Amino acid sequence: MAKESKANGVVEAGAEPLNLDEQMKGIEAQIAELRGTYNFLAQLKQNGYSVVPPKQDGEQPAAK
């Protein structure tokens, strides 16, 4: 299979071109999801909440 070098990467002969609009819509959806998660965590932090990881088996509680 022949490959052709391009400035932005390598294109295989016979490969279909990417649909940039679909790629961008997917990225925008991921950004929106991450922004929502970030805002949720920021609000929890602002209200004084903290995240404590669960204890592993055999682990002693942390001293205060």
Image: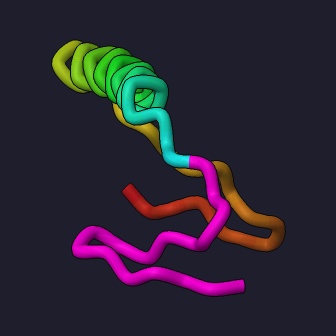
Picture coordinates of residue 16 (x, y %)?
Answer: 61, 49
Picture coordinates of residue 34 (x, y %)?
Answer: 37, 28
Query: From the viewer's perspective, is 26 left or right of 41?
Result: right
**Rendered-image quadrant of the N terminus:** bottom right
Residue 31 shows up from this direction: yes
Q: Name which residue lies at 23% across and 74% down.
A: 7
Residue 14 in the magenta stretch? The answer is: yes
Q: Which residues are magenta?
A: 1-16
Relative to 2, say whether 31 is above or below: above
Q: Nearer the viewer, residue 28 or 34?
A: 28
Residue 44 shows up from this direction: no
Relative to 29, say whether 23 is above or below: below
Q: Nearer the viewer, residue 50 or 32?
A: 32
Relative to 36, say whether 57 is above or below: below
Relative to 43, say whether 16 is above or below: below
**Rendered-image quadrant of the C terminus:** bottom left
